[in-house]
Amino acid sequence: MTSPYVMRPAELSDYDALRSMAVESGAGFTSLPVDEEILRNKLMKSVDSFAGRLQTPEYCKYLMMLENVESGEIGGCSAVKAGVGVKSPFFNYRIITLAQASQEADRRFDMDALILTNEFVGCTEVGTLFLRPEHRGAGVGRLLAQSRYLLIGSKPEWFGEKVIAELRGVVSHDGETPFWECLGRHFFKMSFTDADYLSATTDNQFILDLMPKYPIYVDLLPNEAREVIGRCHVDGVPAYKLLEWEGFNFENVVDIFDGGPIMQVSQNQLRTMRESKVMELEVGAATGATGIAARTDLETYRACLIEGAVIGEKRFMTTQDTLDKLKLKRGDKARIWLRS
């Protein structure tokens, strides 16, 4: 599998490419707002995280760029946030079922309700996954997604025991979402875009101040709001399927702004991590096995698509070009996930 792409840590010089992707990603893509200060801070935080300059690992945020090493083009990005809800609350709605019963009225039925929660404190979040259309195909999407789990595998103790992924909900091109218009707007008295921006730039105290403190009965919401609870944006369907393949499940927790699903999985159940092995790299002409290879050190992390052959239990033969992409040499070790 010859591919010119490599996943590498984001650099400060990637700002222009990151901003372009923020524009292309469209409304509701919370982790890529079209805001210079936020994007530059995101890059700086990632650079400091990879360099080990943050004293507390759970504060780290790792942003990676998908680069075509032949053209220098940036084709996408993805990220890992080591810990959510640590410095500021990470609010969500949990969907609960309330049993209603009356012997006198001879009625018994269940009703769903939304309750405000902050239950993911300390969990690791994977997200910011965006792949430009012209760079899609040939396994690049998998590289973009799975490189995050191989990054976690490079130092698992620095990440949460549970991993979550927040998918964009149903949002129109002009930034309106039925869930927000029918629910959030009544309590916040602002647009979805304004609330989304505040969420990205503040400590989220405004959510605690303004959100209703009591359960919200789903049946009391308009049909257009009920229908989108737990649904992801059409552009997020491939990502949703990849998350399910990886082992993530939707367990009735949704975003408070657009109602999009929040998927979760135990770190030790991540498929990419479970199926990957640390192997010594050899150089030679070999085919038959394809997958993804990544450096085992977090500080200089890189990952790329790989093709070659397994030799024995602990060695993998591949091309010199692959080693060059990873900036490794013959005899070095890499964490390798192979397609079954």
Image: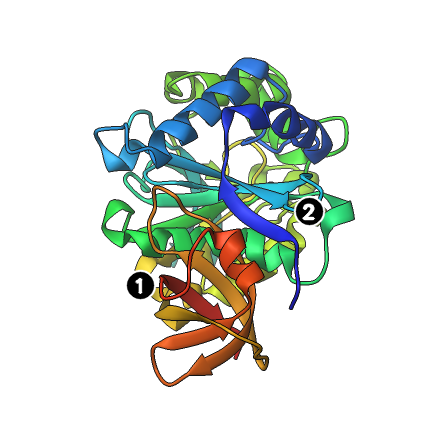
Residue 12 is situated, as x and y percent measured from the top left of the image, at: 51, 24
Residue 307 picture quarter: bottom right
Q: What residue type is labelled 2?
A: Glu
Name the N-terminal-most of marks 1 and 2.
2
From the image, tell me which residue sits under label 2. Answer: 70
- Local SS, label 2: loop
Left or right, residue 232 beside residue 156: right
For residue 172, say whether it is visible.
yes
Between 320 and 200, the one lying in front of the other is 320
Q: In this view, does 69 lie above or below 250?
A: above
At a point 61% along the width and 43% down the height, the residue shown is 67
Residue 50 is situated, as x and y percent measured from the top left of the image, at: 36, 36
Residue 49 is situated, as x and y percent measured from the top left of the image, at: 35, 33
Q: How many labels does the image show?
A: 2
Q: In this view, does 316 lie above or below 324?
A: below
Left or right, residue 339 beside residue 175: left
Residue 286 picture quarter: bottom right
Residue 199 is situated, as x and y percent measured from the top left of the image, at: 48, 22
Q: Judge depth for marks 1 and 2 and give the one in front.
A: 2
Instruction: Give the quarter of the figure containing the N terminus.
Output: bottom right
From the image, tell me which residue sits under label 1. Answer: 268
At a point 64% along the width and 25% down the height, the residue shown is 19
Q: Which amino acid does label 1 sit on?
A: Asn
Label disc, if present, on residue 69 of the rendered structure: none
Left or right, residue 164 beside residue 77: left
Q: Residues within 10 Å of mark 2 (few under 14, many from 20)?
A: few
Between 64 and 199, the one lying in front of the other is 64
